[in-house]
Image (cartoon, grey):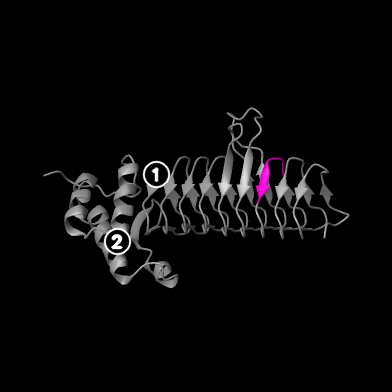
Amino acid sequence: MISTLAFVDPEAKLGNNVTVYPFAFIDKNVVIGDNCVIMPHASIMSGARMGNNVTVSNGAIVSASPQDPRWKGEPSLVEIGDGTTIREQCIINRSIHEGKATKIGAKCFIAAEAHIAHDSQLADFCVVGNGAEVAGDVVMDTCSILSTGVKVFEGSHIGKWAFIKGGCRISGNVPPFVIMAHNPAAYFGVNATIMRHFKKYTEEEIDDIAKSYRHVYQCNVSLYNAVKRIKADIQDSQVRQDILDFIAQSNNRLVALPKFEEF
């Protein structure tokens, strides 16, 4: 159903069973998959590429122009995966680079008034809470969660199954499976409750994760020595390798590393 009170550019490509409510705006150079719902006053701007079963709620803007002076009008994209929900008043900016895309994975949930800036890359099953702000070139891995009011600064990387509690400011890289809380952000433990709820990890794996981060955040040693301890103390496993790989790629930009004394 496409309301006669909505504007749909003739060049836009809409799939089967798409619902467009009154006063929605759909620009040219837009592709919308099957079974999508575009609510009143939502704007789907040029460069949007939406999968199937996506809902865009009232007042949200998908593929808004980048808020970055480096962008000089180059044509670029926003890609939204299947089953993602974008709630009221969200803004998702397209890439600043010609032919490239800001990407939101499948079955993500972007809560009301969230902002996702240019060239950020969200994997599947991510959650961005009410009023959270994600700057440009941020990476969020699978099943990572930003709670209400979180701010993630440019170029940061949020590891998979990480949970950032409300109001945190993140400037750097958050390793997988952890909880970060407070401001300045501090290590608050392992995201065990969510991991148990979805039954993706065993108790033994969760225990190994906790032991690994005890070396990183609670033993007053350098990151170099923490890695050596993890390799020595924790049996080889996929979760241990996930942690070590993330640390190796982080260029010493892990969030909330403790100060320590060299002996």
State the SS at label 1: loop
Mark 1 highlights which residue? 172
The residue located at (42%, 55%) in the rendering is 160
Q: Residue furthest front?
A: 16
49 is within the stretch colored magenta: yes
In magenta segment, residue 7: no
252 displayed left or right of 120: left
The quadrant of the picture occupied by the C terminus is top left
Q: Nearer the viewer, residue 233 or 165?
A: 233
Task: Tell me where the magenta segment starts and ends, as one range.
Answer: 45-50
- Amino acid at pointer 1: Gly
Kindly report the distance in space between the C-alpha atoms of the residues bearing marks 1 and 2.
20 Å
| Residue at the spot of label 2 | 209
The extreme right residue here reads 4
The answer to which of marks 1 and 2 sits earlier in the sequence is 1
- Residue 29 position, x and y percent, is 73, 40
- Residue 117 in sight here: no
Q: Position of residue 142 (x, y in %)?
A: 46, 56
Dot 2: element: helix
Judged left or right of residue 127, residue 244 is left
Q: Mark number for residue 85?
A: none
Q: Residue at x 61, y 34 (%)?
A: 99
Task: Determine which quarter of the picture holds residue 65.
Answer: top right
> What is the quadrant of residue 22 in the picture?
bottom right
Give residue 102's position: percent from left, percent from top. 58, 43
Whether residue 198 sits left or right of residue 222 in the image: it is right
